[in-house]
Amino acid sequence: MKFRLATAAPWWRPANGNLLRIQGGRPLVGTYPISGAKNAVLPLMVSALLTPHLVTLRNVPANLDVAVLAALLQRLGCEMHWSTRAGDLALTLSADRIRPTGIDADLVARMRASVLLLGALLARCGEARLPMPGGDAIGLRAIDFHIAGLRAMGAVVALEGGLIHAKAPAGLHGADILLPQPSVGATENLLLAAVLADGTTTIRNAAREPEITDLAACLITMGAGITGLGSHVLTVTGGRALAGAVHGVMPDRIELGTLACAAAMTDGELMLPHGRLDLLGTAAESFAAAGVDLRETEGGLIARRANAGLCGIDITTQPFPGFATDLQAPTMALLTLAAGASTISETIFEQRFRHVDELRKMGADIAVHGRTARVRGVDRLRGAAVTCTDVRAAAALVLGALAASGETVLDGLDHLDRGYDRMTGKLAACGAAIVRTDG
Ligand code: UD1
C-alpha cells in the first residue's frame, strides 16, 4: 500500500512517527496557511476522468485522502504529473486512456469519496465496477441516493458481494432527480454523470456546499453547461464533449474554522490567509456568539479570543449554509472551555460523537443523550493519552491538547493525515510544542 501511494503521489511520506505529542498551554500566534479544501479536491480530481484532455489543479492539499485517490485513479489508467511552485502543489491529470475496472478494494475501503468514481466512469466509459466505499465510521453513510439518481439516468446498477456494478450500455440520459436529503456526495456524483449524459438533468434538493460550487465551476471551465450554482436546483445541459481546464482548489473552510477555534482556545492570534466569513456559513455567527473573534481583512481572517472570553452556545449541525457537521467536533473542543453550558445537536451523521470519550479523558464535562451532547465548560483541560477515531475527531483532540495543561499523546494518526495538510509543521511554526514520534 505504502509503495503504491508513493508511486501515485510522490510527495506523500508516511509521516515519521505514529504518535503525536503536544505540550499544551502555549498561545498560537502567527500565520497558519490554509490549504486547498480536502472535500473540494477529491471530486475535482475525479472530474478529470470526464475528458481526454489535461486537467490541472492548483492549491492541492498534501493529505492522505488525496494520495489514496491518486493511487485509485492511477489504477484506472489516469496519468498524473505533480509539480510544486512556491509551495503550491499542482496536479495535472490525463485520462486519455482509462479503463472502468480494476479498482482496489483496500484503497476504496479507505475513502468514501471513491464512490464519485461511479458517476464519472459510467458517464465516460459506460461502465463502472467498484467495491462498496469506506470512509469514517460515523454513521450509515448509505449511497442509495447516488444509486437511485444514476438509475434515473438510465444506469443498470447491481449490488453483489460487496461490489457495485453499474452499466449504461446505451449511454446515460438526462433526468429530473429529487434528492430525499441534500447529500453532498450524491449531488457531486450526479453532477459528474450529468455533464456527459444526453439531454438535460435537473438535480432538486441539491446540496449547496461551496465545494459543489467549486466542482461545478471547474466543469463549466471544461465546457459543461450548469446553472443554479449555490442553489438547491442544479440544471445541467449534458452531452457536450469536455475540454481540459486549469483550476485552483478553494480554501479549506473546515481547516479555517478549526484553526479559528484553536486561536481562541489558546488565547493566541492567528492570521488565516484566504479565509472568508462567507465560507463558514452560519458557523461564523455561532463562533462570534461563543467568543471567537473573527476579523475579515484583505489577506484573510484574523482569529482570536474575544475580550469577554469564551461562553457556551447551542448549535445544531445542518447542510450548508448551516453549521457544518465537520466543524462539530472541533467546536465541541472549544466549548469544553467556555463559561456555562452548551448543547450540540448532530443531525447529519448518527455516530459523530466518538470524540466525546476522548475529550472526557482530558477532563471535559460532556453528557450525550442520543444525538445531543451537553457540554459544561471547565476551567482547564489536562493532557492525556487519546485516540483519534475519525478525521474531524482527530482535529478536536489536537485542539484540546493545544489548550490543555501538560502533555497529550495522540494515536490513530491516519485519521489526522487523511484530512490535514502538514498540520504538525504548521502548528509548530505558530508556537505549538508539538512533535511526531514513534510509540
Ligand atoms: C460529505 C463530506 C463530509 C461531510 C458531509 C456532510 C466529502 C468527501 N465528505 O460527505 O466531510 O461531513 O458531506 O457535510 O465531501 N445519505 C444517505 N444516502 C445517500 C447519501 C447520503 O442516506 O445516498 C445520508 C448520509 O448517511 C448522511 C447525510 O445523507 O446522513 C449526508 O451525507 P452526505 O452529504 O452525502 O455526506 P458525504 O457526501 O458522504
Image (cartoon, rainbow, N blue to C red):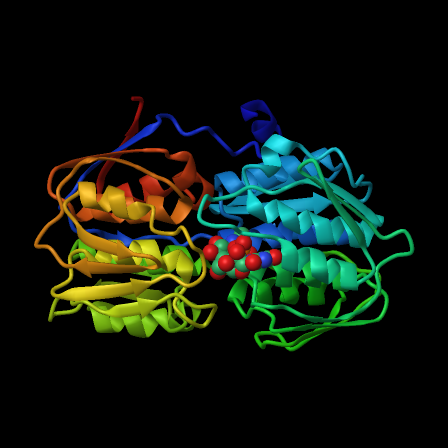
Quarter residue 255 falls in: bottom left
Vertical comparison of 10 with 364: above or below: above
Q: Residue at x 77, y 37 (%)?
A: 101
Q: Quadrant of the C terminus?
A: top left
Q: Where residue 79 appears, x then y in whole percent? A: 72, 38
Quarter residue 330 falls in: bottom left
Regarding residue 51, the answer to whether it shows in the image is: no
Q: Residue at x 16, y 69 (%)?
A: 306
Query: Which residue in the rendered view is the most extreme toward the right?
Result: 170
Q: Where residue 4 appears, x then y in whole percent? A: 61, 27
Q: Quadrant of the N terminus?
A: top right
Depth check, front residue: 182 or 19 = 182
Q: Where residue 69 appears, x then y in whole percent? A: 60, 41
Residue 170 located left or right of residue 350: right
Residue 351 located left or right of residue 434: right
Vertical comparison of 396 with 185: above or below: above
Depth check, front residue: 254 or 84 = 254
